[in-house]
């Protein structure tokens, strides 16, 4: 690690591909960045002015590495792991923005169910325990199918849809393998329209709200396509109101938050999960394509104690969507080449293509968010235009993947 960190730098907790827009925006504004990530090969390190190979969970180690250097601001992007350290470091250095303590309840899916109930928001059946036998016994009394997941997981890791009590033991064991605490949540599957809602708040009110439909990878719990949702004014107002109430309960007065929810046939929005932070899965790119807003710029401004409203003023009103690219294989592989990238970029309506995997990189089955290998963003005058552009571009852009033979 360098002995002298850049002065007046923005400390960015995380250097995954999801964080690249943070570094690009800071560079555009002439702000130096210090990247923190435990992975020596973190994809965003190349976009930072300096890199610190320390876990984003370890606030003490980060402070020790900084030494006498005081950052101008601290920010975290689409990562749950860094949020506790974001708060600790913000308090330590007296930052303009300190991540709210109450929002950390959003990282525990069982605790968040209790937050939802406290707000009077419509809920559904669930149970959680660190005892596998206890959670299995209580889950068996719920209405099937169930979704079994780690209570502290993210990125669709360790999630199983269970149709019958016989499937609970294996699903619980899988969820525990992805849980830091070993606690498993089983909750009733909600039929209805799968949505996600993003907000950016100032003084407790949303000044940017965007609701999107989610399409899943067939047979998986991981998202494949995210599109701006077509809702009635009443539906939009209802969902925004629910999200603002939850933000208030989580202590989020300023800054970003997003929630996964289902809009049922009864018109009620039932919230599945909270992500009290900036969205991942290239959703900030979608917001820019649809509304002309810059939520990444607004987050950096918040971290530095600067006004953020100018970044969140809509400059367009379009439909937009993002296609998340994953391996078509059900086994491990190695990317050998991308074909058709130039042709895909030239498809009318395509606003951006990012390729996260490069030739020679290992490629995993697309069964969790972190296994995506690229993304395509499109915008247009209608949902049909956007869908057609994405379908055309994704048919042209092809990853060539060599299956890796498993050791016998």
Image: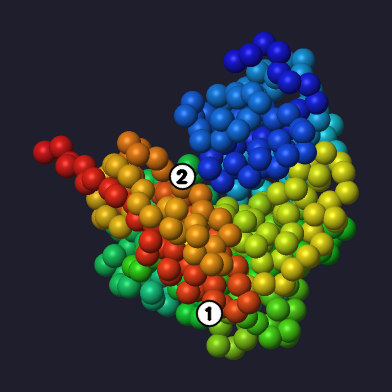
Please tell me whether residue 211 is drawn above or below residue 309 in the rendered image: below
Residue for point 59% across, 41% down: 20
Question: What is the crowding at mark 2: few (fewer than 14 residues within 10 Å), some, or many (at least 20)?
Answer: some
In the rendered view, does 277 fall on the left or right side of 323? right
How far from the left and from the top, in percent, is residue 270? Answer: 60, 74
Residue for point 51% across, 49% down:
354
Q: Residues within 10 Å of mark 1 (few under 14, many from 20)?
A: few
* Residue drawn at the location 53% of the way across and 40% of the way down: 16
Where in the figure is residue 71, as x and y percent of width and height?
Answer: 77, 27
- Position of residue 313 measured from the top left corner of the image (x, y, whole percent): 82, 62
What is the number of the mark on residue 356? 2
Compare residues 180 and 132 and report the one nearer the observer: 180
Asked whether residue 260 is in view, the answer is yes
Element at label 2: loop
Instruction: Identify the mark nearer the N-term, 1 or 2.
Output: 2
Q: Between marks 1 and 2, how big is the CA–CA gap?
A: 27 Å
Residue 401 in the image: above or below residue 23? below
Q: Residue at x 70, y 78 (%)?
A: 236
State which quadrant residue 382 falls in.
Answer: bottom right
**Foreground residue among 130 and 222:** 222
Residue found farthest to the left: 408
Decide which of 333, 346 is in the foreground and name it: 346
**Tag 1 secondary structure:** helix
Please give the label number shown on residue 384.
1
Which numbered disc, 1 or 2, marks the residue closer to the eye?
1
């Amino acid at each position: 690690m360098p002995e002298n960190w850049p002065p007046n730098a923005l400390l960015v907790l995380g250097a995954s591909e999801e964080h690249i827009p943070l570094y690009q925006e800071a560079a555009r504004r002439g702000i130096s960045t210090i990247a923190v990530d435990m992975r020596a090969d973190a994809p965003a390190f190349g976009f930072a002015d300096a890199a610190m190979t320390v876990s984003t969970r370890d606030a003490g180690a980060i402070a020790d590495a900084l030494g006498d250097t005081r950052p101008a601001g601290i920010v975290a992007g689409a990562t749950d792991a860094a949020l506790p350290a974001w708060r600790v470091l913000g308090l330590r250095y007296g930052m303009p923005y300190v991540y709210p303590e109450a929002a950390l309840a959003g990282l525990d899916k069982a605790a968040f169910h209790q937050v939802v109930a406290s707000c009077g928001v419509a809920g559904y059946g669930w149970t959680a325990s660190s005892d596998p036998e206890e959670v299995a016994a209580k889950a068996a009394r719920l209405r099937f199918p169930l979704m079994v997941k780690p209570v502290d997981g993210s990125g669709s890791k360790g999630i199983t849809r269970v149709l019958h009590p016989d499937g609970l033991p294996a699903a619980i064991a899988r969820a525990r393998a992805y849980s830091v605490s070993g606690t498993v949540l089983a909750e009733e599957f909600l039929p209805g329209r799968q949505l996600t809602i993003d907000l950016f708040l100032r003084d407790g009110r949303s000044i940017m709200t965007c609701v999107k439909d989610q399409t899943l990878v067939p047979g998986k719990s991981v998202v494949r396509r995210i599109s701006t949702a077509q809702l009635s004014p009443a539906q939009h107002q209802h969902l925004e109101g629910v999200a603002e109430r939850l933000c208030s309960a989580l202590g989020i007065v300023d800054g970003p938050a997003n929630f996964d929810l289902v809009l049922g046939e009864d018109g009620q929005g039932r919230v599945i999960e909270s992500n009290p932070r900036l969205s991942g899965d290239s959703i900030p790119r979608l917001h820019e394509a649809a509304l002309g807003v810059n939520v990444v710029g607004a987050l950096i401004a918040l971290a530095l104690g600067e006004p953020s409203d100018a970044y969140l003023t809509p400059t367009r009103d379009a439909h937009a969507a993002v296609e998340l690219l994953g391996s078509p294989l059900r086994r491990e592989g190695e990317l050998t080449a991308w074909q058709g990238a130039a042709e895909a970029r030239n498809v009318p309506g395509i606003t951006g293509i990012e390729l996260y995997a490069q030739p020679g990189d290992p490629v995993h089955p697309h069964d969790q968010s972190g296994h995506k290998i690229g993304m395509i963003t499109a915008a247009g005058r209608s949902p049909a235009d956007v869908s057609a552009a994405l379908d055309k571009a994704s048919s042209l852009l092809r990853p060539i993947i060599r299956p890796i033979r498993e050791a016998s």
